[in-house]
Image (cartoon, rainbow, N blue to C red):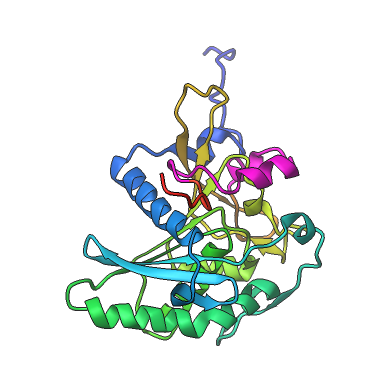
Amino acid sequence: MNNNKKKKRKPDHFDRTNFRRKVENLDLLYKFAKFASYSKRASCLIGHENRMAEGIYAFAESHDQEVTIAIKGTKYDFQKWMNRKNVLIEYPGNFDHVKPRVDLTFYDDYVKSRHNLIELVKTELSRHIKSFPRISLVGHGLGGVYAIFLALELQESKIMNPLNVFTFGQPRIGDVAFADYVNKKLFIFRITLEGDYVPVIPFRTDPGRGYLHHRNEFFIDVPCDCNQESVVYECRGFKNPEYGYFDEPPYCINACELNVDQRIKIHNGPYFGQMMGQCQDD
């Protein structure tokens, strides 16, 4: 027997190849680009007819046998926001075990707009329910936060079970229990862009109980060579052996270097060719 034969090395726990894979599905990439265009349109909304609450706007449009609700979130000074005191409050509902907690500011802002957002959904359903029985929600930044709160409420109140939820550059919303609750209730395409600062805040200062992203991150890896195309990766988390919950992917947005000034500029894109907030006619 050859005792010098090398043993097969087990893959490293944080090996990139184990935690992300390139998205080759062209239909999925097309879907990302389509919903990015809706999110861009929402980022440019202004006017009373689209106003859900102070600074929060939304519009609805039917397409491909489906209704899309696109939400524009309020604007924050992220430089100041990073230094704010993060407060988690209990998410309303009946829960058997640990009650999920969500960011106070995010949820308060959603509550101000929830009635108008739900009425917008009901109006669209009444108009299209016979021919368009499906609904998708989309939002960029804080618009993505409100889209998730709305999706949960539509499902919890049995108004409608959203078909798809797409968020672009969405910050963390709540704690470990809330992330687990979202994972069980919804499938969210959480799209992140290399260099964006927003998806890594609020910071994870309490790994056992503090802020945590839900699953299904799709990461746009921007190459250093401008002549190369960006690559989209589907990112996988892992079961945290210390705390027992499903943790965030280590090798996607969380692996990016922190450069606050630059990363805030990157927050608006481009996402599949769409620059959020660039509202002039092309």
- Residue at screen point 47% across, 21% down: 227
Query: How far from the left and from the top, in percent, is residue 54?
Result: 60, 76
Query: How far from the left and from the top, in percent, is residue 98?
Result: 64, 78
57 displayed left or right of 120: right
Query: How far from the left and from the top, in percent, is residue 166?
Result: 44, 58
131 displayed left or right of 8: left
Residue 139 vs 126, above or below: the answer is above
The C terminus lies in quadrant: top left
- Residue at screen point 57% across, 17% down: 6
Residue 108 vs 62, above or below: the answer is below
Residue 98 in sight in this render: no
Q: Name the foreground residue: 184 vs 7.
A: 184
Q: Name the foreground residue: 85 vs 123.
A: 123
Residue 82 in sight in this render: yes
120 displayed left or right of 196: left
Q: Please give the range of residues in magenta.
A: 249-274
Q: Quadrant of residue 209?
A: bottom right
